Image (cartoon, rainbow, N blue to C red):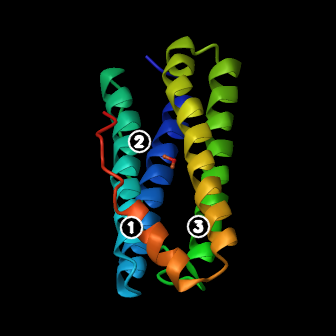
Amino acid sequence: MLKKEMVDALNKQINEELYSAYLYLSMAAWFDSIGLNGFSNWMMVQYKEETDHAMKFFNYLSQQGEPVKLMAIKEPPNSWESPLHAFEETLKHEQHITACINELVDLAEKLKDRATYNMLQWFIDEQVEEEANDREIIDILKLIDGSKNGLFMLDRELAQRQYTPEI
Ligand code: FEO
C-alpha cells in the first residue's frame, strides 16, 4: 500500500508522460508536413516510448492495488521555427521531466517508500539517455546550420530509429 501523497504524485506523472507522448506525436506530424520523414519517424518512436513510460507508472499503481486517475492532457504546440528549435524544445521538455522524476525520488525518500524508490531508478537512467540523445541531435543540427544536404543526410539517419517496447 502506498501513501496517498505518492499515489497522487504518480498519477500526475502518468499525465506528464502522456503529455510528452502528445508533444512528440505533434512534432512527428510537423516534421512529416515539412518533408522530413526520418525526423518524423524519430519522433514517432519517441511518442511510443513515452506511452510506455506512462504505462510503467500505470502498471505500478495497479500492481500496488492503488487507483489510476487519468487527467486531461494539455494541447501541445503544432509548429516550430526549425528542426533545431523543435529539438531544443524537446531537450527543454526532457529536462522538465528529469526534474519531475527527481521530485518523485525525493518524495519516495521522504516517505521511506522503498518500492517506489526502486521502481524510479529505471527512470533516472532513462532520463540521462533521453537528454543525451537530444543533445547529440542538437549538436549535429548546429553543425549543419540549415544546410539542405546536411538535413537530408540526418533525415536518412533518423529514419533508421526503431521502436523497442520498454514495458
Ligand atoms: Fe518519459 Fe521522455 O520522458
| Callouts 1 and 3 close, C-beta under 8 Å | no
Select label 3 or label 2 by which is in front: 3
Say which residue label 2 marks: 53
Q: Secondary structure at mark 2?
A: helix
The answer to whether the residue bearing label 2 lies less than 8 angstroms from the nearest atom of ligand 1 is yes
Q: Where does the image place residue 58, in percent across and percent down from the top left?
A: 35, 37
Q: How many marks?
A: 3
Rendered image: mark on residue 87: 3
Q: Is residue 43 left or right of residue 63?
A: right
Q: Amino acid at mark 2?
A: His
Q: Is residue 71 left or right of residue 127?
A: left
Q: Amino acid at mark 3?
A: Phe
| Callouts 2 and 1 close, C-beta under 8 Å | no
Q: Secondary structure at mark 3?
A: helix
| Separation (CA) of disc 1 from disc 3 | 17 Å
Q: Is residue 116 left or right of residue 159?
A: right
Q: Where does the image place residue 133, in percent across and percent down from the top left?
A: 56, 50
Say which residue label 1 marks: 156
